[in-house]
Image (cartoon, rainbow, N blue to C red):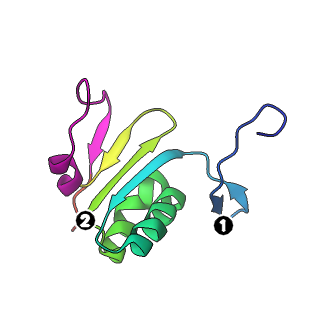
Amino acid sequence: MHEGIKYAHIIDPRDGMPVKHIVSASIIHHNGALADAAATALTVAGPENWHRIAEKMGVRFAMLIDADGTVYLTPEMKARIMFEPGEPERMIVSEFR
């Protein structure tokens, strides 16, 4: 928090500012270090590019939530999780090419 504004701890290297668009990233992978790195990379990539970065990193189970509450996820992650009390209003499932 600074002057009433909450800033994320993840910095976008393109502009040196904290990311604003993604508020949560969840990755499931057998390699914890890769999952942690992927969560950071996908957060920086944002809603437009996260699925491309996930594919390049070999991450099949990924979910992001943006500041507006839109949920972005891979088909594999969608099949693995259950939303309570029901699915979110805005959900975008991105398949790899």
Q: Earlier in the sequence, mark 1 or mark 2?
A: 1
Which image quadrant for residue 51? bottom left
Distance between the Cα atoms at labels 1 and 2? 26 Å
Q: Report which residue position mark 2 lands on.
A: 60
| 23 w.r.t. 35: above or below | above
In which quadrant is the N terminus drawn? top right
Tell me which amino acid carries mark 2. Arg
| 19 w.r.t. 85: above or below | below
* Residue 74 in picture, x, y percent from top left: 25, 55
Q: Is residue 56 left or right of residue 46?
A: left
Residue drawn where x is 39% and y is 70% of the image: 32
Q: Report which residue position mark 1 lands on.
A: 14
Residue drawn where x is 15% and y is 49% of the image: 79
* Element carrying mark 1: loop
Q: Is residue 43 left or right of residue 7?
A: left
Which image quadrant for residue 6? top right
* Residue 5 in picture, x, y percent from top left: 75, 35
Q: Is residue 75 left or right of residue 50?
A: left
Span colored in magenta: 75-93
